[in-house]
Structure formats: structure tokens, C-alpha cells
Image (cartoon, rainbow, N blue to C red):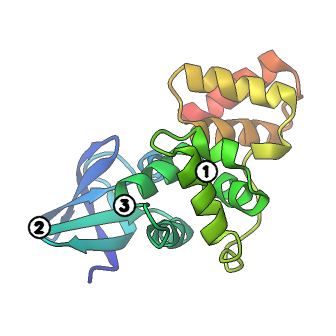
Amino acid sequence: MIAALRGKVAEKQAGAIVLDVGGVGYEVLIPIETYSRIGEPGEEVSLHIHTHVRENVLALFGFHARQDKELFEKFLGVSGVGPRLGLALLSGLSTPELLRAIRTGDTKKLVRIPGVGKRTGQRIILELKDKLEAFDSDDDGAGDGATAVEEDVISVLVNLGCSPAAAARGVAAARRKGAPAEFETLFRTAMASIKR
């Protein structure tokens, strides 16, 4: 099984990259978080890889952070959750937000992710709630502790085309920089953080 790849980005698009490793191009499916962290074509990148083999399909799923790969593999252990839905989960919310939603039983947050119905959200929580001890509980997302103003900024950013995870990270970064909990300033600082 392929567990990791290091090479140059040959092609990059939302949801997938082609990674040139010694002249061989590997198509690797990736979540939004990983897409936002890897460089442009020609730049070198290292990815943690999950190799998914099923009947006549061999697919590679790549993650910038080891923790994202491990959470993805936990999702695959849940009845009814396949690799595409696992990627959708990791693209819909940041890893800290996903962990918090599962630990607190927040089905509503999971159901907002495209492809996740109420039953699937409940099953994810039921099957994983007590299996996440190994995961960091450090929280750098805006998430459930977000103020009403922060939630408003996240909502506007999502409406402008950001993923929920990227919007939450932008707001969290803006707060760390000392932006006040006032809509206009927080919005501008968060936008600047996301554009970088």
C-alpha cells in the first residue's frame, strides 16, 4: 500500500491533484483543506496517502496533515460512509470542528455537509464518539464557541464562495491577530487571511 508520496505538483484542481513522483504521475483525491495548503504546479509537496482498493478500483486519497488522514480512515469504518463522503466531511468542516461536532453529538452541524443525511450524521456520532481519544482536542476553528458576529462573518464568507472550513479558519486567524468582534473589521481581516 502507498502510505505517503513526495513529488512535484503537475496539475491542481479542486478535489484532486496530479503528483509527479520521479516521472510517474499519480492522481490523488484531496479535501479542500489540503488543496488550500499545497503549492502551485511545479512546487514540491508531501502528502499522507490512504490507498483505497475495491474490486477493480484503486484510488489514492491525500492529506496534508496526518490527523486528517487518520480521521478519514475512521470515517471509512462507519457503516455507509465511503471515501467520497469521507472527503466531503473533511472538506465541509475543519478537523477541529468535525471532532467537536462528533464529541458533542451535534448532528445539525454534520447534516449541513452535502451528502450527509440525518441518519448518516447520527451513525457517525454513534460509531465514532468514543473512538476519538487519540485526536488532538486543540481547537483553532471558530466553531461552536463562535460569537454571533463571528458566525455572521463565516456565513457571508461561505456565501462569497469560501468553504465553511476556510471561512472558520479565516475568522479564527483574524481573532488571533486581535481583530475586534465587530463585523466589518473582522470580515476584512478574515478575508485578508484567506487570500494569503
**Viewer-side label of 1, 2:** 1
Q: Quadrant of the C terminus?
A: top right
- Provide the secondary structure element on which disc 2 rests: strand
Residue 94 has which mark?
A: 1
- Closest to the observer, 100 or 69: 100
- Closest to the observer, 37 or 42: 37
As drawn, the residue found furthest toward the top would be 184
Compare marks 3 and 1 and give the one earlier in the sequence: 3
Quote the CA–CA distance across marks 3 and 2. 24 Å
As drawn, the residue found furthest toward the front would be 119
Residue 101 rendering spot, x and y as whole percentages = 71, 54
- Provide the secondary structure element on which disc 3 rests: helix
Residue 62 rendering spot, x and y as whole percentages = 36, 63
Q: Is residue 126 above or below residue 166?
A: below
Residue 83 has which mark?
A: 3
The residue identified by callout 2 is 24
Q: Quadrant of the N terminus?
A: bottom left
